[in-house]
Amino acid sequence: MIKNLYLIGFMGVGKSTIARALRKRTGWELVDMDALIVRQQGMPVAQIFAEKGEEEFRRIETEILAKISERDHQIISCGGGVPMRRENVRIMKENGICLLLTASPYVILKRVEKDTSRPLLQGKKSIRGISGLIKERMPYYEQACDERVSVNGRTVRMVVDEIVRRMTKRGYTEEETEQTGIVKTEIKSRRAGSENREARAKRGQAGAASCGARTGRDKSGSRGKRNGGD
Ligand code: S3P
């Protein structure tokens, strides 16, 4: 069984897009590290870099990585700098598998050309600039990854199929997904049931008899694969 899947790779390679598609395919939770950091800090990544500095951003990144890694069945889209820290690599290896997404500098350039949210790309948006950064990063990425998949010339569907094949080789099964979906659906419907009861209690309508009947219905709640919509 795979505990978590960490998607690593250079900025603009498509980690967030592939992570969203994988969530739909597997029913696992989606965790986007940058989005979590932005929400927690209440400011965009570029502002964190500008006001608190890169070192502080990296500290927050490691803290968040450790926290989310306590849970399982997650597709975790990592910021491009995550594999640069040994501590981060240790956390990822202990809690799942690392899959490296790669793309040519040209493909990456086309994707990040107009982007202003990534401070480390400022002044480097050329084939030469991006190739240089990739060259510096590649040894770290290669050391961290368990699997490697190129996105060059492939559709999202093709990349996702390839990733699921690799996950399957490492013990992932569709049945596991079904079970995860069912457990989550049951928890959700149980929660919804208790919320309804609380609402009825507040309105003064809750009665022991009706509670029993509704509990029965809630327990047999719908079974099915969770379908994360985007
Ligand atoms: C970074 C990548 C970014 C973001 C930050 C630093 C990096 O994430 O975490 O700008 O050092 O490569 P994405 O890879 O999602 O763009």
Image (cartoon, rainbow, N blue to C red):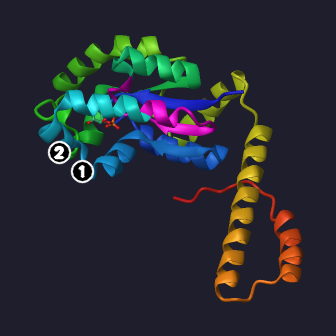
Q: Is residue 219 above or below residue 73?
A: below
What count of labels does the image hold? 2
Q: Residue at x 64, y 33 (%)?
A: 164
- The answer to the question of whether label 2 and label 1 lie on touching residues, with beta carbons closer than 8 A, is yes
The location of residue 56, given as percent across then percent down, is 23, 31
Q: Specify whether residue 73 is painted magenta.
A: yes
Examine the image and state in which quarter residue 2 appears.
top right
Q: For the residue labelled by badge 2, is the local secondary structure a helix, a strand or a loop?
A: helix
Q: Of residues 94 and 181, which is closer to you in this image?
A: 94
Q: Is residue 104 above or below residue 182?
A: above
Q: The disc labelled 2 sits on which kind of residue?
A: Gln
Query: Looking at the image, can residue 148 be seen?
Result: no
Judged left or right of residue 73, residue 118 is left
The location of residue 163, given as percent across then percent down, is 59, 31
Q: Residue at x 35, y 42 (%)?
A: 34
The 10 Å Cα crowd at callout 2, few under 14, some 14 to 19, many 20 or more, is: some
Badge 2 residue CB within 8 Å of ligand 1: no
Q: The disc labelled 1 sits on which kind of residue?
A: Met
Q: For the residue labelled by badge 1, is the local secondary structure a helix, a strand or a loop?
A: loop
Q: Which residues are magenta?
A: 65-82
Query: Looking at the image, can residue 179 be seen?
Result: yes
Alpha-carbon distance for marks 2 and 1? 6 Å
Examine the image and state in which quarter residue 103 appears.
top left
Examine the image and state in which quarter residue 217 appears.
bottom right
Q: Which residue is mark 2?
A: 47
Q: Is residue 195 above or below residue 210?
A: above
Q: Which mark is residue 43?
A: 1
Judged left or right of residue 13, residue 204 is right
Q: Residue at x 53, y 45 (%)?
A: 30
